Amino acid sequence: MSTLVWPAIPPEDLIREEEETQARELEWLLSSLQDTLRSLKEGLEECAELLAPKEPGSTLVLSSLRSENLKGFITRVGMRIVKGDVQLRLPSLPPPRGQNSYKLTISNLPTAPTIVLDQLTTIRTLINACLDVVDATRWTGDSTNANFISGQLKLLHDNIQEAKSALKGWTEHQKPWYEDSVDENAFNPPLPPNVSFHLSISEAAVLLNVRTLETAYPNTGTNTPLSLNAGAGGQSYSGFSLRERLATALGGSRQAFHDEAHEVFAYKGQDVRVRDKVRVESQDPSLMAAMAKLGALERNVALSRRALDVVMGEEQDEG
């Protein structure tokens, strides 16, 4: 079956018709993208609402799997942790006399440092930037300029991807625990000097890592820093029992059951090792909803970009 047009269209007329058709398609697409931008703004505003600091906040249960090493809760309001109690049962952190666990309580004193989840601050900043991009694209730019709209969609896509990555966690901009542990004075009483309390976001969940620390090179002479494990009068706060210290002095080894046992970290000006470590994740419904919405927005923007590239004749190879 022939698909030839008869009578034949002159080549120059065919080229003109194709160009006019493409121009009409581009005009229609740019017009329809205004509706897409309105929809994107609604979705971004929903994400911003999920991350907004609203009372009473989200109270998240903390519980270590298959052990009693860590139990407790924290309350998140926006980017801040405003309340929390954690009970620890770790071999290297003996509880006070008469108690069966070591309690960490987030201070509610007005002078206490604020515990801020930096990833959530980054995400909220990126979402606000996306809202600015949408408004600029709709109201201050030339909606009929395909190159301008294409550039704005790329900026929007990049910001949404970065916000989603921050919710997933472990981006290149995220500080490691030994550079970003919670200030000891954020607790009442203050955190023991040999304990690191680190909060972050991973896969839209709040991730808590508590570590007890010891000097990495305790037998190298008087130059070894002692402030991590010694208080006033030289009293040890390392949390190690007399039996453990005797066993170590006699050449016995201390067993470690975590992934950082044989690493050395520079923590607050000292080389330290991680004695005990407990890791707990607590799913946050608001963060999970925000990540799902960001994923949907990312796909919508990617589809719009692809469609515009095709009509503009700038379709790029996948990969």
Image (cartoon, rainbow, N blue to C red):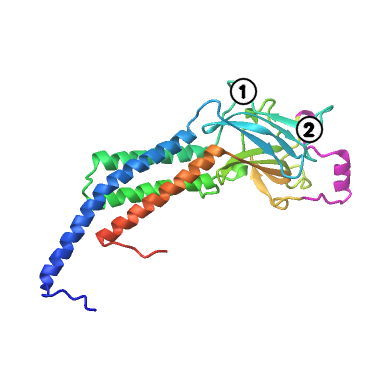
The answer to whether residue 245 is magenta is yes
Q: Is residue 227 among the parts visible in the rendering? A: no
Residue at screen point 71% across, 43% down: 278
Quadrant in the picture for the C terminus: bottom left
Residue at screen point 73% across, 30% down: 103
Q: For the residue labelled by badge 2, is the local secondary structure a helix, a strand or a loop?
A: loop
Which of the two residues, 46 or 63, is positioned nearer the viewer here? 46
Q: Which mark is residue 108?
A: 1
- x and y percent of residue 208 in the render? 64, 40
Q: How packed is label 2: few (under 14 Cα within 10 Å), some, or many (20 or more)?
A: many
The quarter of the displayed image where residue 96 is located: top right
- x and y percent of residue 311 in the render? 26, 59
The residue beneath circle 2 is 101
Q: Amino acid at mark 1?
A: Asn
The answer to whether residue 180 is magenta is no
Residue numbers of the magenta segment: 232-256
Q: For the residue labelled by badge 1, is the local secondary structure a helix, a strand or a loop?
A: loop
Q: Is residue 307 among the parts visible in the rendering? A: yes
Give the Cα distance between marks 1 and 2.
21 Å
Question: Relative to 264, is 49 on the left or the right?
Answer: left
Q: Amino acid at mark 2?
A: Ser
